[in-house]
Amino acid sequence: MRDIWIYSESAAVATQMIACAGKISQTGKLRVFISSEDGTHSIVRAGVDEVTVFRSADGRAESCVEALSALAQTERPLAILFESSCSGKEIAARCAAILGTGLVTDALDIRNNEGIIETDRMVYGGLAIATEALSSPSLITLAASLYTPAAALGAADASLRIQEADGGSAINIVDRLPIERASVDLTKADKIVCVGRGVGKKDDLNLIYEMAAALGAEVSCTRAINEYQWFPPESYIGISGFKVRPSLYIAIGVSGQIQHLSGIRDSKTVVAVNNSESAPIFASADYGIVGDLYDFVPCMITALRKN
Ligand SMILES: Cc1cc2nc3c(=O)[nH]c(=O)nc-3n(C[C@H](O)[C@H](O)[C@H](O)COP(=O)(O)OP(=O)(O)OC[C@H]3O[C@@H](n4cnc5c(N)ncnc54)[C@H](O)[C@@H]3O)c2cc1C
């Protein structure tokens, strides 16, 4: 079969992955599997052929593994796409083990080369891109946020099926507690001010927040700053953090190591402020200011307030 399947835990992510799947779907069907019924109306009108909602009594996404793998064993899709989230990767890995196939995680790009799925992904901390040709079914996780959601086509709705999916598990859930997360979704931010280790102490963040407020930007950080715990856990940008695509990204006291740059490569305009003219960030910046951030940021705030 030449079908492309998508597995997602949310309708919003599914519509982004549909846009990606459209790139590799040729003659086969496009089928979405989702573990939540919320928002399925947006998927059925997004140009897919079939939507299956996996319903499980325990609400665990992993319960879908057996159901999805069993279907894939009989129907042999060309590829199954998962989101590059923690649970997306776990489900993809379990399915790959059951199906006896490989898994590419964190794909940056994906192509259909005459029926063979090819992926690009970063290796060596972002220093090189590996291109891999995959056997079928090709299991791939990718950052859905890299894709603009597929719009409702106004075409005929896809067929919608509900399937019970209780895989049975040795794990017994006794409680669920929310994880503390950054209050904003950085992957959707239009403007981002990123704090690097050039910002000497936590109190100085007030200055950064002031500038960000004047710009209407969100504030984020590098992994080095993340380790200081000045921000909610895991709110940093980079290869192991968020991949962002704002129209404006301003790096304040960020050196621009490759692991950080790989998270900002889809930014439209990059501005860097650094007091070392040899900082690598300048090679990736559209505008570079060689200077002390403690001089630059107050000037910027004054200028923004004048306008
Ligand atoms: C496996 C692995 C994964 C990683 N993943 C990530 C990731 O996802 N994201 C990430 O960010 N990092 C990641 N890192 C860490 C990365 O390699 C860098 O160490 C980190 O990005 C550096 O952060 P920084 O730029 O804040 O700090 P630094 O490298 O210390 O840079 C601080 C910069 O501030 C400048 N500066 C100092 N004072 C001032 C001043 N007063 N005014 C202006 N400029 C000033 C300095 O010139 C310097 O360039 C990873 C590392 C590894 C090994």
Image: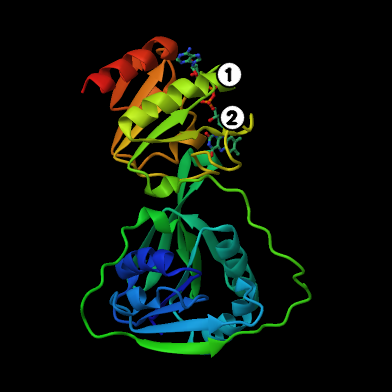
Task: Tell me the SS state at disc 2.
Answer: helix
Please name the residue shown 41% across and 48% down the image.
Answer: 187
Task: Tell me the SS state at disc 1.
Answer: loop
Residue 190: x, y in percent? Answer: 32, 42
Cβ of mark 2 under 8 Å from ligand 1: the answer is yes
Disc 1: CA contacts within 10 A as few (<14), some (14-19) or many (>=20): few
Nearest the viewer among 301 and 277 is 301
Instruction: Give the labeled residue for mark 1.
Output: 201
Nearest the viewer among 123 and 185 is 185
Q: Quarter of the image for the C terminus: give it.
A: top left
Tell whether label 1 touches label 2 (CB within 8 Å). no
Rendering quarter of residue 251: top left
Residue 101: x, y in percent? Answer: 58, 72
Does any portion of residue 193 appear in the rendered image?
yes
Question: Does 262 sit left or right of 165 as displayed?
Answer: left
Please name the residue shown 54% across and 58% down the image.
Answer: 85
* Vertical position of residue 266 compared to residue 144: above or below: above
Q: Quarter of the image for the N terminus: give it.
A: bottom left
Disc 2: CA contacts within 10 A as few (<14), some (14-19) or many (>=20): some
Instruction: Give the labeled residue for mark 2.
Output: 224
Looking at the image, is mark 2 or mark 1 earlier in the sequence?
A: 1
Cβ of mark 1 under 8 Å from ligand 1: the answer is no
Please name the residue shown 60% across and 69% down the image.
Answer: 91
The amino acid marked with disc number 2 is Ala
Question: Does 267 sit left or right of 5 as displayed?
Answer: left
Residue 174: x, y in percent? Answer: 77, 69
The amino acid marked with disc number 1 is Lys
